[in-house]
């Protein structure tokens, strides 16, 4: 799959994956005013326009990336494993995404709710699965 930022300066290519997830943690919601909706791409991505990528180290183990020109959110990256969670907005027209998982479900505000049936992980379960020891 190939996605790009709003202005086209950054293009990211990844193996096809249509399993989409949403993160409801406070940082993701502050970053984009909504849950961060992404696909897991792992370490095997190719980036064109890397000079236009800005990063923000949001924790001891992760960084968030954006296009320096248009501000598009590109990915969340786990530094120890180089695993990338790519923003689904990069991929347009959208593939037939399948909404499979929500993490930090216990941090989701009460004022929105998705109707999809998904695997739901709490903050503790999310950290147990994704954060380094």
Image (cartoon, rainbow, N blue to C red):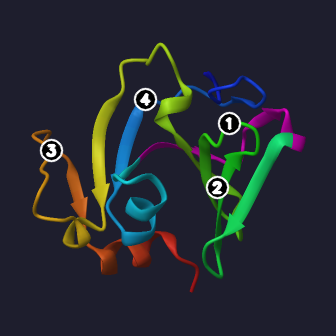
SS of the residue under disc 2: strand
Secondary structure mostly taken by the magenta-highlighted segment of the chain? strand
Furthest-right residue in this view: 51
What is the spatial separation of the Cα atoms under label 4 and label 2, in whole angstroms? Answer: 16 Å
Q: Residues within 10 Å of mark 1 (few under 14, many from 20)?
A: some
- Identify the residue under disc 2: 83
Query: Mark 4 packing: few (<14 Cα in 10 Å), some, or many (20+)?
Result: some
The label nearer to you, 1 versus 4, is 1
Residue 18: assigned label: 4
- What segment carries the magenta color? 37-51
Count every numbered label the image shows and give the total.
4
What distance separates the C-alpha of mark 3 from that of mark 4? Answer: 18 Å
Please state which of the two labelled residues, at mark 3 or mark 1, is closer to the viewer: 1
| N-term-proximal mark, 1 vs 2 | 1
Where is residue 84 shown, x and y percent of the image?
62, 51
Residue 53 left/right relative to 128: right
Query: Which quadrant of the structure image shows residue 3?
Result: top right
Of residues 87 and 30, the one nearer the viewer is: 30
Mark 3 Cα-neighbour bin, 10 Å: few <14, some 14–19, many ≥20: few
Instruction: Answer with mark 2 or mark 3, whichever residue precedes in sequence.
Output: 2
Q: For the residues carrying marks 1 and 2, which lies nearer the camera in this image?
A: 1
Quadrant of the image for the C terminus? Answer: bottom right
Q: Is residue 49 magenta?
A: yes
* Badge 1 vs badge 2, beta-carbon distance below 8 Å: no
């Amino acid at each position: 799959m190939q996605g790009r930022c709003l202005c086209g300066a950054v293009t990211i290519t990844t193996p096809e994956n249509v399993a989409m997830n949403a993160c409801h943690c406070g940082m993701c919601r502050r970053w984009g005013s909504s849950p961060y909706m992404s696909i897991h791409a792992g370490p095997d991505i190719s980036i064109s326009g890397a000079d236009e990528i800005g990063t923000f180290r949001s924790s001891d183990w992760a960084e968030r990336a954006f296009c320096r020109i248009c501000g598009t959110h590109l990915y969340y990256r786990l530094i120890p494993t180089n695993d990338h969670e790519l923003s689904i907005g990069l991929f347009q027209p959208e593939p037939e995404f399948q909404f499979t998982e929500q993490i930090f479900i216990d941090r989701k505000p009460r004022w929105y709710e998705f109707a999809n049936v998904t695997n739901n992980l709490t903050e503790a379960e999310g950290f147990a699965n994704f954060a380094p020891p």
